[in-house]
Amino acid sequence: MVKKYDYLIVGAGLFGATIAERAHRAGKSVLVIDKRNHIAGNIYTENQHGINVHKYGAHIFHTDYDDVWQYINQFAEFNRFTNSPIAIFDGKVYNMPFNMNTFAKIWDDCITPADAIKHIKKERQEITHPPTNLEEQAISLVGRTIYEILIKGYTEKQWGRPCTKLPAFIIKRLPVRLTYDNNYFNDKYQGIPIGGYTKMVEKMLSGIEVRLNTDFFKDKAKYQSLASHIVYTGPLDEYFDYQLGELEWRSLKFETKVLDEENHQGCAVVNYTGHDVEYTRVIEHKHFEFGTGPKTIITYEYPSAYRKGAEKYYTVNNKQNDQLADAYRKLARKESNVIFGGRLAEYQYYDMDDVIKKALDTDIS
């Protein structure tokens, strides 16, 4: 059978869009399909009341890769947004990530970096043995006070279980910055595409055939027959019909409200680190693009267990899932004409720039 396309791209998210754009620019024939009714995957933004709403949670672009920054700037102009979230615990506001502003709020006598080091070093001594769970690991890194205020509740809500029941390796390190700097990321480049991420991905896919509301698995054999090469960005275990078992995921639920307010919380992202509320953070979308106007839109983000039909957001990287993912990766390597890429297809949490970097480094010759 003569193949109609050089490349079939399953999924119109960042990995798929980057491969599609590169292949199209190289003169290849490309078809992109996506089971959703929109492009851009989880970075999809939808304009409501003149505000670009991040429909699948906050996405802030940041990178240290020069090639990634140069590449993505072909398709969008980025603003100067700097991620400086705050955390609320017991009615008090704290700066994130942990920096001198945070420490000065926690300890009244903390003014200099030496003061912060003194407090943290003293509290770390509580753990005198190799950490056996996440709680002990966190305390061994930053002490009990920071752990109780900024880590414990948020983490327990995120993962749906006590920190004492979570493995220590989830927190390998915690950023402690001994400067009065609220910039969450240290990367060289940072910002939000002006006009939203959907507009950016539209430009990436310009001139490429895209079919939405199209489920690869509804007729897998037909779609496989269409192209010489397949780029698959869906769930790794689903590609193999779950023959080895299902990989575990955590999901999220969102509650979005339109408010007749010009400015609701004064910040794009506010984390809620206590158990007094079920949600982990509230996003006020207009602040990503320095929006004005009489209305604002906020989204409450609730972590949840994954159930069939929900979106898959976070991998559950315990021993069982890591072994199962490795077994599926071995099967994937045997699929000679299929490229598995992105968060779902690799069972790997990625920042946006890492997804693009992987796609740029993928051989499509």
Image (cartoon, rainbow, N blue to C red):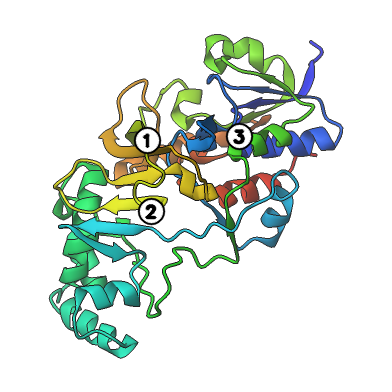
Q: Is residue 233 above or below residue 360?
A: above
Question: Residue beneath label 2, please?
Answer: 266
Residue 157 lies in quadrant: top left
Q: Give coordinates of residue 182: x percent, y percent.
A: 41, 68
Question: Residue beneath label 3, please?
Answer: 198
| Element on which disc 3 rests | helix
Please state, as top left, top right, bottom left or bottom right, where the C terminus lies in the image: top right
Of the image marks 1 and 3, the number of the one nearer the N terminus: 3
Q: Is residue 25 above or below residue 221?
A: below
Q: Residue at x 33, y 45 (%)?
A: 282
- Callout 1, which amino acid? Asp
Q: Which residue in the rendered view is the most extreme toward the front? A: 294
- Callout 2, which amino acid? Gly
Please state if 269 lies on the left or on the right of 195 as rendered: left
Residue 241 lies in quadrant: top left
Circle number at residue 260: 1
- Callout 3, which amino acid? Thr
| Element on which disc 1 rests | loop
Viewer-side residue, 329 vs 157:
157
Q: Can residue 231 be seen by looking at this rendering? A: yes
Q: Marks 2 and 1: CB-CB under 8 Å? A: no
